[in-house]
Image: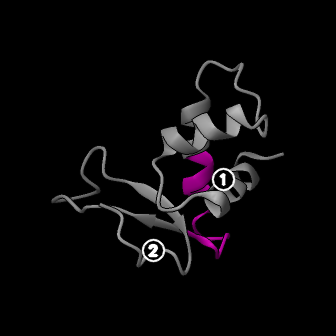
Amino acid sequence: MSYVQAALEILRSSKGPLCTREITDRAIEAHLIDGRGKTPNASMRAALYRSLGTEAALVKIEDRGPTRARRGTVRWTLRGLETLDHT
């Protein structure tokens, strides 16, 4: 299963937006992805950002800083669930 497919499955079963680390950890626990690599979290993050333009269901929620998202504020969810309270 690809990282994006695993993330979508995890997000479908979550009760709200998740950070990349939470998605990765849950995907590894559920044996959806192989966590033996050195940086599975970085691989998941890269896959999610790459798929933003092509995966219509995926939504990135962030608190904007002056030039990009503030550190530690990016959360991922599925379209239609982004309006739920994510604080």
- Residue 31 in view, yes or no: yes
The quadrant in which the N terminus is found is top right
Mark 2 lies on a secondary structure that is loop
Q: Tell me if residue 10 is in the magenta stretch.
A: no
- 65 left or right, relative to 71: left
- 21 left or right, relative to 29: left
Q: Looking at the rendering, which quadrant does residue 87 occupy? A: bottom left
Of labels 2 and 1, earlier in sequence is 1
Q: Which residues are magenta?
A: 46-58
Q: Residues within 10 Å of mark 1 (few under 14, many from 20)?
A: many
Above or below residue 37? Residue 42 is: below
* 77 vs 60, nearest the viewer: 77
Q: Looking at the rendering, which quadrant does residue 83 occupy? A: bottom left
Identity of the residue drawn at 67% across and 70% down: 54
Q: Looking at the rendering, which quadrant does residue 41 occupy? A: top right
Residue carrying label 1: 10
Q: Position of residue 84 (x, y in %)?
A: 41, 74
Mark 1 lies on a secondary structure that is helix
Q: Position of residue 71 (x, y in %)?
A: 27, 44
| In contact (CB < 8 Å): disc 2 and disc 1 | no
- Residue 82 marker: 2
Q: Position of residue 61 (x, y in %)?
A: 39, 65
Identity of the residue drawn at 26% across and 61% down: 63
* 29 vs 49, nearest the viewer: 29
Indicate the amino acid at tag 1: Ile
Indicate the amino acid at tag 2: Glu
Mark-to-mark CA distance, 2 and 1: 15 Å
Above or below residue 50? Residue 41 is: above
* 75 vs 38, nearest the viewer: 75
- 53 left or right, relative to 59: right
Identity of the residue drawn at 73% across and 49% down: 6
Residue closest to the far front: 15
